[in-house]
């Protein structure tokens, strides 16, 4: 028996929904962090703040949509936000 617990819950019912929600939440967190940083800067860039707020709102809207999404929509949202998170972290 292994001392390391198996933390892969992807085969459990609801695993895809939880994974998609986690990815979208990570994107929302990225936007929140960037917003806080920009607002604390000596001269905040209002255009950037508006862009960040719009991106965050879109993610929050998709996060809410996950509650009623079918499996295909859930997979689409998860893939979209996984790619977006990768892009945001590389920028």
Image (tube, rainbow, N blue to C red):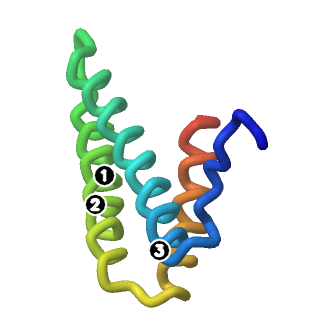
| Label disc, if present, on residue 56 of the rendered structure | 1
Return the x and y of residue 78 as percentages of the image width and height. Answer: 54, 67
Return the x and y of residue 91 as percentages of the image width and height. Answer: 59, 35
| Label disc, if present, on residue 14 of the rendered structure | 3
Q: Nearer the viewer, mark 2 or mark 1?
A: 2
| Position of 60 relative to 30 (above/below) | below
Find the distance from the CA under tag 2 to the CA under tag 1.
6 Å
Residue 37: quadrant of the picture: top left
**Furthest-right residue in view?**
1
Q: Nearer the viewer, mark 2 or mark 3?
A: 3
| Position of 27 relative to 66 (above/below) | above
| Label disc, if present, on residue 87 of the rendered structure | none
Return the x and y of residue 88 as percentages of the image width and height. Answer: 54, 42
Q: Nearer the viewer, residue 34 or 45?
A: 34
- Going from N to C along the chain, the mark reached first, 1 or 3, is 3
| Picture quarter with the N terminus | top right
- Quickly name the residue at label 2: 60
């Amino acid at each position: 028996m292994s001392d390391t617990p198996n933390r892969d819950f992807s085969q459990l019912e609801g695993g895809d929904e939880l994974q998609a929600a986690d990815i979208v939440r990570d994107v929302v967190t990225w936007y929140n962090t960037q917003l806080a940083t920009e607002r604390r800067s000596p001269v905040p860039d209002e255009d950037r703040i508006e862009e960040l707020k719009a991106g965050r709102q879109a993610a929050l809207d998709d996060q809410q949509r996950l509650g009623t999404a079918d499996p295909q929509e859930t997979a689409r949202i998860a893939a979209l936000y996984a790619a977006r998170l990768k892009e945001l972290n590389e920028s």
